[in-house]
Amino acid sequence: MAAAVPTAMNDYQLPPFAHQLVGMQALVEHPFFFLADEMGAGKTKQVIDASQIMHRQHVIDRVIVVCPASVRDVWYNEELGELKKHLWATTPAVVTEYHARRRQWKSGLESTSPLRFVITNFDFIRARDGDTSRLDYLKAHCNKKTWLIIDESSAVKNWKAAQTKACLTLRKLCGRVTLLNGTPITNSPEDMFSQGNLMHPSILECKYISHYRARYATQTVVMSSRIGKDGKPMPLTDPYGKYIQKVTGWTNLEELQRRFAPYVLRRLKSDCLDLPPKMHQWH
């Protein structure tokens, strides 16, 4: 049983709201989790505070954040970034930006075992530097005490994409993973196939996309322009002779929701009554 998240405000730079304490407790308790709060509810703060709690409990010693390139500096920036805003003065921390130009800064107390953050982006890690995979540096720093954060996780919704495969490689080496996204489904329930398997294969129990579609999609066979001996169009087949099908709709979504429910937390800003009212800027 994970230790309770401390509610004392001595350490926090910005005291968490009640809904954020609930989210932090969920992150501490679940080695794989999907924090799907609406934008503005403080997903990043919940991760940063929870990481420091788990570092203090000797659960983790490193956090790897993979995010869109446009968000990298939101995490990393030494003056205005989220880490600068939420790291505790009592937390020894080293923050590294893993990119073409590698940068680093430190925070908190000096220590031989600081909490290390590595911030990188999807585009960077999916590419290579000549014969060297950029994943090699990250893989060398992954272990059971590494927490992988996938920020804007819709970037890994395509199971065939190089960046999805790169994140899955890291996931297999890390003890914990959390997906962050305010809009987890952007196109269809198919978005959740690779996101679910990246969290843990036990959630969906569908190793292949064909299994997932067979369980949750309605499909029709795609017909070719070729006419068979019976005078009817012939179905298209793949190189293995199987009929090619296209998804026409979705079914069994209550079961899909049930499978994800224990590992997903989603709150709308309107549900977070402890948030301050929106500030309007008058010109």
Image (cartoon, grey):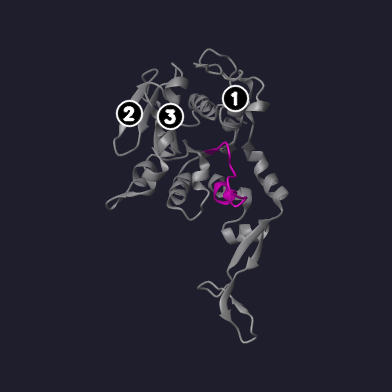
Disc 2 crowd rating (10 Å Cα; few below 14, some 14-19, many 20+) is some
Between 209 and 230, the residue placed more toward the observer is 230
Amino acid under disc 2: Gln
Label 2, label 3: how many angstroms apart (C-alpha)? 15 Å
Disc 3 crowd rating (10 Å Cα; few below 14, some 14-19, many 20+) is some
Amino acid under disc 1: Gln
Q: Identify the mark at residue 104; answer none if there is no mark.
A: 2
Q: Identify the mark at residue 102; answer none if there is no mark.
A: none
What x and y, as percent, mark residue 90? 44, 16
Residue 180 within the segment the image draws in magenta: yes
Check whether the beta carbons of the residues at disc 2 and disc 3 lie within 8 A of each other: no
Can residue 152 be seen here? The reply is yes
- Residue at 67 percent across and 27 percent down: it is 271
Secondary structure type for disc 1: helix
- Residue at 60 percent across and 69 percent down: it is 222
Residue interval drawn in magenta = 178-196
Q: Name the residue under label 3.
A: 74
- Quarter of the image for the N terminus: give it: top right
Q: Which of marks 2 and 3 is nearer the N terminus?
A: 3
